[in-house]
Each structure stands twice: as C-alpha cells, then as structure tokens.
Amino acid sequence: MQTVETQNEGLKRAYKLTITAADVEARIDAEVKKIAPQVRMPGFRPGKVPANLVRKMHKDALHQDALNNTIQEGVQAAIADNNLRPATQPDVQLADGYEQGKDAEVDFHLEILPEIETPSIEGLKLERLTVEATEVELKEALDRFAENQKSFKTAAKSHKAENGDQIVIDFEGKVDGVPFEGGKGESMAVEIGSGQLIPGFEEQLVGMKANDAKTIEVKFPEDYQAEELKGKDATFDIVCGEVKTPAETKLDDDFAKNMGLEGLDQLKDLLKGQLEQELNGLTRTHMKRQLLDQLAAAHDFEVPPSMVEAEFEQIWTQLEKEAQSEDDPDAARKEMESEKDDYRDIAVRRVRLGLLLSEIGQANGVEINQQEMNMLVEQAAQQYRPEDREKFIQYLQENPMAAAQLRAPMFEDKVVDFLLENADISDKKVTKEELEAAIEAEPDEKPAKKKAAPKKAATKKPAAKKSPAKKAAAKKAPAKKTAKKPAAKKPAAKKAPAKKAAAKKK
C-alpha cells in the first residue's frame, strides 16, 4: 500500500492511497481460512468444505469486506503516521472505474485540529459580583408560590364564569364537522384568562354556568404543533360540569403542611435556598463571561471550517425557530439575514473557545469519570421510548464522537470551574438589578443590537401539585446525532413534550 499527500493547506489535508490487488487477495485468503471451519455445506463434513469452494460461494462479499477493511486501515495508518488530529471524519472516495483484481486508488481528505500552544492559566483576574437574597425578594417568591398554588371552591350553580374563575369542562373538537385525534377530553379544569388554551378558546367560556352547553369557534395557530391542525378553523362542543371561584390563600403553617412540609418556616427556607441558587447562577454567568472574554482576547488561531459551519447551522436553525414564533416572522428573518456575518463570527468564537477549553482541560487532567458519563447517558436515554433506549446506548458505544458530544457540556463546566478556582478573584456586593445589568452590558454571543435582557430562573415549587388533566407521554425514536467538537458547549437534549389535548397552545 502506498500513501501520497496531495493537499496540505492550513487545516486541510488530502491523501491518495494505492491498494494493490495482492493486498486485497491476501486479506481474502486470511478470511477464508478463518471462516472455512465454520462453513456448513451439504455433502461435506463440518469444517471440511474446501477453501476454494468457500471463496467461490462468498466471492463478492469477501472481496467487499476485504477492500473496505484495507481502506479503513490505510486511512488510519496515514492519520497515525502523519500525527494528525482529525477535526472531522475523513471523507473517503474510491476512484471511479475500480474493478476486482486490479489495484484500487482511494482519495481521502479531512480537516485537522489546529496546534494550540497550551494556554496559560496564570494572570486571570475576575470580579465576583455577589447578591444576598433580601426579605423583599423572599416575600415576592412566597407570593408567587401562593399564586401558583391557589385553590378554587365550587360556586353556586347559578354563578356565571368570569375571568379568573376555574371552569371544569368536557369538550370535543371538530374540523369541517369531523372529530380529530386528541380533540376530546373530559373534566378538564381551565382557569379562564390563564392563556392555557389556544387563542379565542378561554374567552368564549366566560358566562357559562354549571350544566350549560355551547359550541365555540376557534382557529388553530399557524405554528401549532400538530401539522394537520395548523391554521385550521375548528369548533368545540363544550359542556360545563361546574364553575369554581378563587379561594383565599392563607400563607401559614397549614398551607405549608398541605404541601407536605413541616410548616411555613420550612417553605421559606426552601424558597430562600432556591433564590440563593438563582443568584449564585447569575454570579457564575457573569464570571464565566469575563473568563471566556479574556481567553478569546488572548488567543487567535485558525479553526476548522467544517466545525464552524456545523456550529453556525445550529445557531441558524435555532434563530429560524425563534423567528417563526415572532409576531412578524418575515421581519425577524430579514433582520437575521442582515446579521448573518455576525452570527458566523459567533460560531467561530464558540469553536475557538471550545478548542481552548478542551486543550486546557487535557493539559490539566480535567476529565469526566465513568460514573459521571453513566449519569449523562442515563439522562439522555430518558428522552427515548423504553424499547429504544438500548439502541441509543449502543449508538453511543459505537460512535466515540457522539459520546464526546454528550460529554462536552459537563466537560466545559468542569474546565470553567477549574479556571475559576485558579483565577485571582475580587468580591463585590451588588444588588440583583446591578448584577443583571452587568451581565446584559457585557459582550456576549449575540450581535449588539440583538442583545436581550437575561432570563430570570423560574422559582421552583418544593411540592407542586399535579394537574388534574390527563396527558399521554409523547414518544420519540432514537435519531442519529452529529458529533461535533470535543469541548464546545451544546444545548442539552430536550425531552419530548407531553402530548396535550388539542385545545392547548403550542
């Protein structure tokens, strides 16, 4: 086998392999000797089938396997002999016109990772803005929690449903007079004015009394999740079971005990802990941005174009989804197009930072242990149907780059934590508003005019009650995932949303 380099430009490499017919034949001979003892054929004792007959029976399959394996070994040998670190899977092409019994010419090209001088972790100076949870914020959190846990009491049968009331309904939806899948439900509790259902639905429930029946007309949104219902006009036959009015929520020990807690003090402690966790998250976000900005400013090297393109496609796909949900999707897409170059620069920054963090992590012994990897696999497998989870796990085992992609977010976080531990940090107490303003003012990964205010983490409920509405879990089959750089942050895999009644919003 001969290997000749045909391209060496920047991070692009290309080679031509010449595989002799003798190499392929030698591999076929070895394979025939290996499998012949297991071959069964009428007229021959087990293991006594002549090798030449085995070769004749399986000629094409033996040749294809031998050629493929020889090519694979040749490519891997070229990578090893030239000390290459592939950024992508090699693109391998067998020359046109190849015939069995003749030498084979194979072209392959790939992009390699850049040689990065081990980044210095010395001299990192960061400011840690800290915020204490105030009594005012705790009171607001308690009020929000009470609002989310508000109860309702059954109203008189003569009471007409008003905005803010809860109405319990049976319903059946139809398009062109024909019932559709998922459009029927019983005893569904709806708080009028909550925005829980598709536009126009809740407003038409106002005025209904217990045992009333009516038919309402609605139009499904253009972005509704069910393809067959998008933009369709529909009717719903409604029967009101009962109307309930809001009951007074008293924040006391009894309220907390009904939530499964010891008392109001424990509820306050839980909410305070959640507030502190949220504030610590904002503090870390601010410090991480400072850290990444310093790393980005101190390092400038070529990055693999294919990795940039993959990252850009991911960004662009997300932007297109967001544009679709805007009031004026066309205007949003037009603005996107005007900033396309800026978003490509963002993709370059992300790839470069990912490679930097990977280099820092490897140089300093940061790793994901087996227990952590098992946890990541288990979490990711939950997005699939039980019968498909084994296939997903097998896919990860057979595709190291896919497994690396799964590790990437946790690996990046661990590298960032390592750098924060080794940085020179000064502390400064600020208000929550000042911290949020500092995050918003910092250079981030969006074009300047697109910069958005940071999102606030939602307060979690320590013992949230389950909704009375019954929902069937949507099932998702395993899909092949594209592996990317070993340390660039990727969004977490999202679990398939619960399938709601057709009246629910997307």
Image: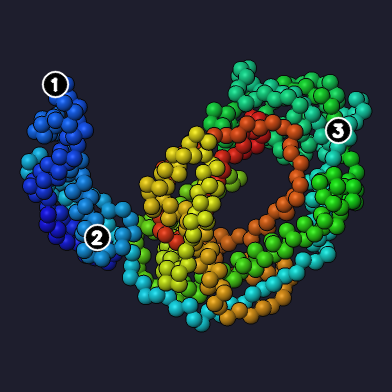
Dot 2 corresponds to which residue? 79
Picture coordinates of residue 409, whole percent (x, y) = 51, 58
Picture coordinates of residue 35, whole percent (x, y) = 19, 37
Measured in 3D between alpha carbons, the distance from the residue under mark 3 to the one under mark 1, in whole angstroms, is: 84 Å
Dot 3 corresponds to which residue? 244
Q: Is residue 230 left or right of residue 156?
A: left
Instruction: Determine the secondary structure under disc 1.
Output: loop
Measured in 3D between alpha carbons, the distance from the residue under mark 2 to the one under mark 1, in whole angstroms, is: 48 Å
Picture coordinates of residue 14, whole percent (x, y) = 21, 58
The amino acid at mark 2 is Ile
Q: Based on the displayed image, in which of its 4 quarters is residue 243 positioned?
A: top right
The amino acid at mark 3 is Lys
Q: Based on the displayed image, in which of its 4 quarters is residue 466 positioned?
A: top right
Above or below residue 353? Residue 428 is: below
Query: Mark 3, mark 1: which one is toward the viewer?
Result: 1
Above or below residue 125? Residue 389 is: above
Report how many numbered discs are placed on residues in the image.
Answer: 3
